[in-house]
Amino acid sequence: MADDVIVGLDAGTSVIKAVAFDLAGYQVAKAVCDNELHYTGDGGVEQDPGRTWTAAAETLRTLAAEVPGLVERVSAVAITGQGDGTWLLDAEGQPVGRSMLWLDARSSDIVSRWRNSSVGPTTYASTGTGLNQSAQSGQLKWLSEHQPQRLARAATICHCKDWLYHCLTGERATDPAEAVWTFGSYQRRDYDDAVLEAFGLSAYRRLLPPIVDGTREYAALHRRAAAETGLKAGTPVVLAPVDMLATGLGAGVYDPHRRVACSIVGSTGAHLYVRHRESDIVLHDQASYTMPFVAPGTWLQLASNMAATLNIDWFVDGLNALFEAVGQPAVDRTQLLGRVDAALARVPPGRLIYHPFICTNGERGPFVNPQARAQFLGLDADTTQLDMARAIYEGIAFAARDCYAALDAAPEEVRITGGGAQSATLAGILASVLGVPVRPLVREEAGAAGAAMVATLALGHYSRLEDVCAQWVTPHLAACVSPDPALQQVYERLFPVYRDAYAHSDEFWRAFHAAGNPSTPRTAFADVRDPATETK
């Protein structure tokens, strides 16, 4: 049958996925291709745009080859991808060097100065988004100070998904979410020249691309891209929202009848809540991202912590490193993670406090501190490694609660997706820490599904987002995991301790950094995966 498939293309940090869905929202096939990260040695993390396009095209070709007749069946390709970062194009549409990613820490000092001056509060009032080291604004300022020759060659500044949209269609555009949270007004849903002026970046206004609403418009796949991807020229291409929003959409963050939230528990953590009225938007302590949502007249607020399951990966990889150091064979990573996860259900709660700030470039939500570091508190001679592992799970859950508190969100239910959602132990801890039922998503590719859902609106298959969600999301939600009353009491006592402890750690982090704390970004990010879905 022709035109009965939508392809969601999800360009994660190091993995690009193309997923085919039928019009009822069920996955038909998936193809995956790795991408590469480059480390500059001074806190920079970059990506080659040419390689990113080559990987995306290869992924689409592989998908087309795996499903007989797929090319004729594709009604649209919808693109989402990693957020923040800085991708520069010249007048001919070619990349101007490698792109700075959301992991890049080189603008940290600039962002810190802005946050501690009038710039931070002034821009936050318009964008609704607190400044952090991942944001394009700080990276653009860093480029203007350190690599002005690159900016002189640039004609457009965009993001990862925008670059792939350009490669597929020849168009230069970005979605409303990233446009507004970086340089815009969440109230007017457009760029705000006063924000650029506050950053001292007015000279670069000319580089900002047009804003395209993927629920209402699309472009056509051009011939060159068709030849490279194996798809049919003229196929509609939809610029979907950034991956965090697309993943939340695919995981069920939207329900006009109930107060639901969504936590993406992947390599990073993202905690999302829909505001159905502008008056409900909460701006507190430069802690949130605020962006136009897919449904008319709604907004999405998000607080994102830099590391969720990356903390678990660090622990499991450390166990294997110990095995190898004493001459024992390493255990398969997935198998070892499964064993640890199963054992933790029997470990007493609350033996330690763990702050899950394992990323080398610090924390961004609900507070911003590039020098923040992970830490165990409360160790004694009776502490076991399983106690430490349990504390890591609890720390991830406390970080989620901390983010929801910063958003002043009061959900009746939290939907969870990402690699961490596969753990029944972590789901139970999350439910008890948050104090509300948690509902895992059983669909694998929520980000690609969310992008495809936007395409169904653009193509006119549905007129209301509510109807899309009923068809594409509800059947893929598992049964609720309810809070354990006894655990909930423990965590109610511990959560204030968790927050108070890191609030008093800033002096230690600054002194530790000043004393020459060695930093190794390559080690910290050598195995970064798609923050929406991966645990490894």
Image (tube, rainbow, N blue to C red):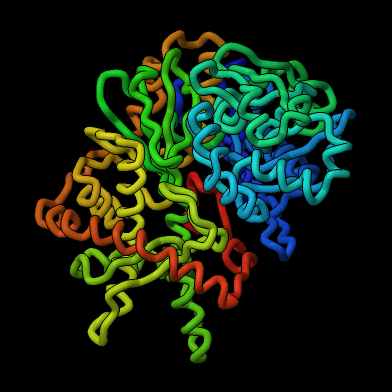
In this rendering, the count of numbered labels is 0
Q: Quadrant of residue 44?
A: bottom right
Q: Which residue is drawn at 70% across and 23% down?
A: 173
The location of residue 260, given as percent across then percent down, is 29, 31
Position above or below: 438 against 249 = below
Q: Considering depth in this image, is 319 or 46 the residue closer to the camera?
A: 46
Position above or below: 389 against 248 = below
Q: Quadrant of residue 347?
A: bottom left
Q: Residue at x 66, y 30 (%)?
A: 196
The location of residue 106, given as percent across then percent down, is 67, 55
Position above or below: 179 against 424 = above
The location of residue 56, given as percent across then percent down, is 70, 39
Quadrant placement of the N terminus: top right
Q: Which residue lies furthest to the left in this view?
A: 486
Q: In which quarter of the image is residue 339?
A: bottom left
Q: Which residue is drawn at 50% across and 56% down?
A: 369
In this rendering, position of residue 331 left or right of residue 157: left
Q: Which residue lies furthest to the front in this view?
A: 118
Residue 418 in view (yes/no): no
Position above or below: 28 against 191 = below
The location of residue 6, given as percent across then percent down, is 57, 24
Residue 90 in view (yes/no): yes
In this rendering, position of residue 134 left or right of residue 97: left
